Amino acid sequence: MLGYLIRRLAQAVVVVFAMSIIVFTGVYAIGNPIDVMIDPGATAEIREKLIAQYGLDQPLWRQYFTFLANVAQGDMGTSMVYNIPVVDLVFSRLPATLELVFVSVCIATFIGIPAGLYAGYRPDSVAAKLIMALSVLGFSVPTFWIGMLLIMTFAVNLGVLPSGGRGDVGSLLGIPTSLATLDGWSHVIMPALNLSLFKMGLMIRLTRAGMVEAMRTDYVKFARAQGLTDREIIFSHVLRNISIPIVTVFGLELGSTLAFAVVTESVFTWPGVGKLIIDSILQLDRPVMVTYLVLVVILFVLINLTVDLVYARLDPRVRLKGGS
Amino acid sequence: MSDTLTPEGNVTATASAAPAETRASRLRDFWSDYRRSPIAVLSLAVVVLLAALSFGAPLVAPQDPYDMAALDWLDAFLPPGTEGSGGYTHLLGTDNAGRDMLSAILYGLRTSFVIGLSAGALALMVGICVGLSAAYFGGRLESLLMRVVDLQLSMPAILLALVLVAMLGQGVGQIILALVVAQYAYFARTTHGAATVERGKDYIEAARSTPLPTRRVLFRHLLPNVLPPLIVVATVQVASAIALEATLSFLGVGLPLTEPSLGSLISNGFKYIHTDRTWLSIYPGIFLMITVVAINLVGDQVRHVLDPKNQR
C-alpha cells in the first residue's frame, strides 16, 4: 500500500507541473492585458514602466520561472483588476463556492440515491418511470436555463426566494457561512438545487443500474432463500456492492460540481470563485485566471488520487495490480 | 470445366451480394427494435423536424433577424401574437431590437446544429484515431495517449471549453475547435475500450498476418467492429456540444449577440427577467431544451437497441 501511495503521489506532482506549464502558456496567449489595464492616454514612459513592473517584457520561460519562484513563496501575483493579492482574492471567494457545492452535493445524494434505489427495485412502476424521466431532464437540460426558470418561478412570480446574492453571512463554529442564518439559507437553496440537478440525475441512473444488476445476482437469491426481507437485503448486501461506482462518481463529481458552479454562480450572481473566473476571463485578469486554473488542476489531481486510494482500500485487487 | 466455373461464379456472386443484404437487413432489424419505444420515435421525429426547420430557416422564417435593415425599432418588445410593422404576426414576440423571436430562434437553432454536428463529427474522427492507435500499437504510445485522455475526462468539459474559448476568441470556428478539444476524449476512451477487446480476437490476428497495410487493418477490419458504442457516444456528444455552446454564449464568452445563437438569445432575454417580458428568454430556452432532450432520448434508445444484453 505504501509503495502504491508513493508512486501515485509522484505521478500527481508531475501532472500538476505539466499542467501549470500548459495553463501558463495558454493564458499568456490570451490578448494583451496591457491594452485593457492601461489608460490609452498614458504616456509611453508610464506604459514602459508598467510593462516592466508586471514583468511582461521578459520572455515567456523567464516569466514562468518568476511565477514558480513567487508561488514557492506563497505569492500568486496581484489581480490586475482588484489590485489585491490573488491568493487573498480567491480565498475570500472560496467559502461561498464551497458552501454552495456542499449543499448541492447533499441534495443530490439524499434525493438521488434513494430515488435510484427505488427505481431499480421496482423498475416497471410509474414512479420509477417518472424518476427516470426527471433524471434525463436533470442532466440533459442546460443548467443555466433551469436556473433561469427557477428565478422566474420562485423569485419573480411567487416572490418567495431572493433571485441572487449570498444573503446574511453568520458564523458557524467560527467559519463565516450563510448556512448559519435563515436569510442565508433562503439565498443558497435555489442555486444549490440548480447545481445539484445534474449530479442527481447521474446518481439516480448509477444507483438504479447497480440495483437492477444486483437484484439478479446469486447472492441476492441466496439471501432471499435465507429468509431475509428485501429491506435487509438492500441495505446490508446490495448497497455495499453497488457502493464502489457511487463513491467514485461522488468523488469525481465533487470536482465537476466546483466547475459547474461557474454557470450557476453567474446565473444567481453568487459571489464565489466561479463568478470570479468568468469576470477575470472577460476582463483579461491573467494572474487570477492562472491561479484559479492551477488550483482547479491541483484539486482534480487530489480528487483522482483520493478516489484511487479509496478504491485500493475497498478493493484489494486494485492495489495488487497497480501497486509496488 | 463448367462444373468448376459454376461454383466459383456462385461464390463471387454471394460474396458480393451478402454484405449489402446483411447491411440492409441489419438496418431493418435496428429500426424494428428502435420503434418499440414510442417516445424514442417521437424524439427522432422532433429532431428531424427541428433540423429541417432550422436549416430551412431562410425559407421558413418570416424575417432575416440579422439583417439590420429589416429591423424596425418601433417593433421592439412586442408580446407574442402581436402584428408588427412588417404586416405579419410575431408568433413569439420581438426582442429589444425589434427582431422577430421565432426567426431569431430558427436561425439560432441552425447555428446550434452546425456547431453540434461539426464538433461531434470532428471529435469523433480525432477520438477514433487516438483510441485506435493506442489500442493497436500499445506500449508507450498507449499509456501516454490514454493518460492524457483520462486526465481530460476527469475535468468537466465546460471548464476546458471555457478556458479554450477564452484563449481562442469568439466565433463559430473557435467554439467548434474548443468543443472538439474538450470532447474528443470521450470518443477516444470508448474506441480504446472496444478496440482493446477486439484486438485480442482471431480475425485481427488473421488480418495482421496478411500483407495488408496497417491502415487498412485499422480502418476496415477493426473500426467497423467498434462502431456501435461510438454511435451512442456521438449522439450524446452532439447534444452536449449544443448545450455547451449555449452555455458559453450565455456566459458571454461564446458567440456575440450579432451572430444567431440560442445561448446569446437567452442571455439577452435574461437581462429582462425581472420585467414581464419573459418571452425573450422562455422561448429560445424551450427550443434549446426540446432539442437537447430529444437528441438524448434518441441516443438512449440507440444505446438500448445496440446493447448486446437486449439483443433478441
Image (cartoon, coloured by chain):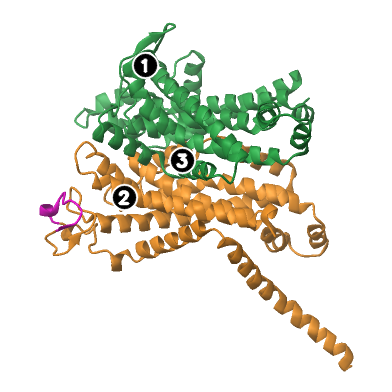
The magenta-colored residue range is B72-83
**Which residue appears at 64% of the width and 33% of the height?**
A245
Discs 1 and 2 lie in a common subunit: no
Q: Name the foreground residue: B235 vs A139.
A: A139
The chain ID associated with circle 3 is A
Discs 2 and 3 lie in a common subunit: no
**Which residue appears at 37% of the width and 50% of the height?**
B288
**In magenta segment, residue B101:** no
Q: Quadrant of residue A320?
A: top right
Q: Nearer the viewer, mark 3 or mark 1?
A: 3
Q: Name the foreground residue: A75 vs A273.
A: A273
| Above/below status of A319 relative to A215 | above
Q: Quadrant of residue A90?
A: top left
Circle 1: is it few (<14), some (14-19), or many (20+) Cα within 10 Å? many
The chain ID associated with circle 1 is A
Is the Cβ of the residue at disc 1 closer than 8 Å to that at disc 2? Answer: no
Q: Quadrant of the N terminus of chain A?
A: top right
Is the Cβ of the residue at disc 3 closer than 8 Å to that at disc 1? Answer: no
Q: Which mark is drawn over residue A178?
A: 1
Q: Which residue is mark 2?
A: B284
* Kind of residue at disc 3: Gly
**Which residue appears at 67% of the width and 24% of the height?**
A310
What is chain B's hue in the picture? orange
| Above/below status of B220 relative to B130 | below
What is chain A's hue in the picture? green
Percent position of residue A150, x then y: 33, 35
Q: Which residue is mark 3?
A: A138
